[in-house]
């Protein structure tokens, strides 16, 4: 069995560093993919514990992301984006993301969020 890991679907290099760095400090692994093709390939190799979807990347349609994930459904899909982009946030909810939140809340609660996700996987 492989250790639990997460995936971050984004093209934002600064935000990638924040998420992967926070995960690393806490002792967990979050990898980054920058395309739906990369997401599909990575989840075909091993199912992640969580997938984080950056809704600020407008070429990642939430329905398309969920379609890619339907075969190897991770335990949790969390989408985050601009608090003023209510349309994208609603699309993510409608597509079936487990949690949808403003980017500011995602950033502020990232350590607790990661701990919650990965600590649950340890006890499973």
Image: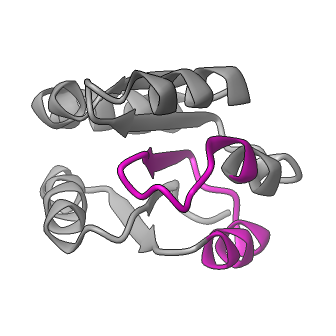
Residue 117 visible in the snapshot: yes
Tell me where residue 89 appears, x and y as whole percent.
Answer: 46, 26
Residue 60 magenta-drawn?
yes
Which residue is nearer to you in this view: 100 or 57? Answer: 57
> How far across and how far down the image is residue 48, in percent?
60, 55
Query: In the rendered view, would you say 105 is above or below 23?
Result: above
Quadrant showing the C terminus: top right
Query: Nearest the camera: 50 or 107?
Result: 107
* Residue lying at 35% horizontally and 71% vertically, measured from the top left: 11
Closer to the camera in the image, 118 or 90: 90
The residue located at (22%, 55%) in the rendering is: 19
Question: Does the segment drawn in magenta span residue 83?
Answer: no
In the rendered view, would you say 24 is above or below 102? below
Image quadrant of residue 17?
Answer: bottom left
Work out whether residue 124 can be spotted: no
For the point 45% across and 47% down, which residue is it? 52
Q: Position of residue 107 (x, y in %)?
A: 16, 37
Which span is picked out in magenta?
36-64
Left or right placement of residue 90 versus residue 67 in this view? left
Q: How is the image coloured?
A: one colour
Q: Quadrant of residue 91?
A: top right
- Of 97 and 113, nearer the camera is 97
Q: Is residue 23 above or below residue 104?
A: below
Image check: 82 left or right of 98?
Answer: left
Residue 55 in the figure: left or right of residue 2: left
Quarter holding residue 41: bottom right
């Amino acid at each position: 069995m492989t250790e639990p890991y997460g995936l971050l679907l984004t093209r934002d290099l600064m935000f990638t560093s924040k998420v992967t760095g926070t995960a690393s400090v806490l002792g967990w692994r979050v990898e980054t993919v920058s395309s739906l093709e990369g997401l599909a390939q990575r989840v075909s190799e091993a199912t992640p514990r969580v997938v984080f979807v950056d809704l600020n990347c407008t070429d990642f349609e939430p329905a398309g992301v969920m379609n890619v994930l339907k075969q190897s459904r991770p335990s949790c899909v969390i989408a985050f984006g601009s608090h003023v982009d209510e349309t994208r946030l609603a699309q993510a909810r409608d597509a079936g993301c487990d949690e949808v939140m403003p980017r500011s809340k995602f950033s502020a609660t990232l350590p607790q969020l990661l701990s919650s996700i990965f600590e649950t996987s340890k006890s499973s």
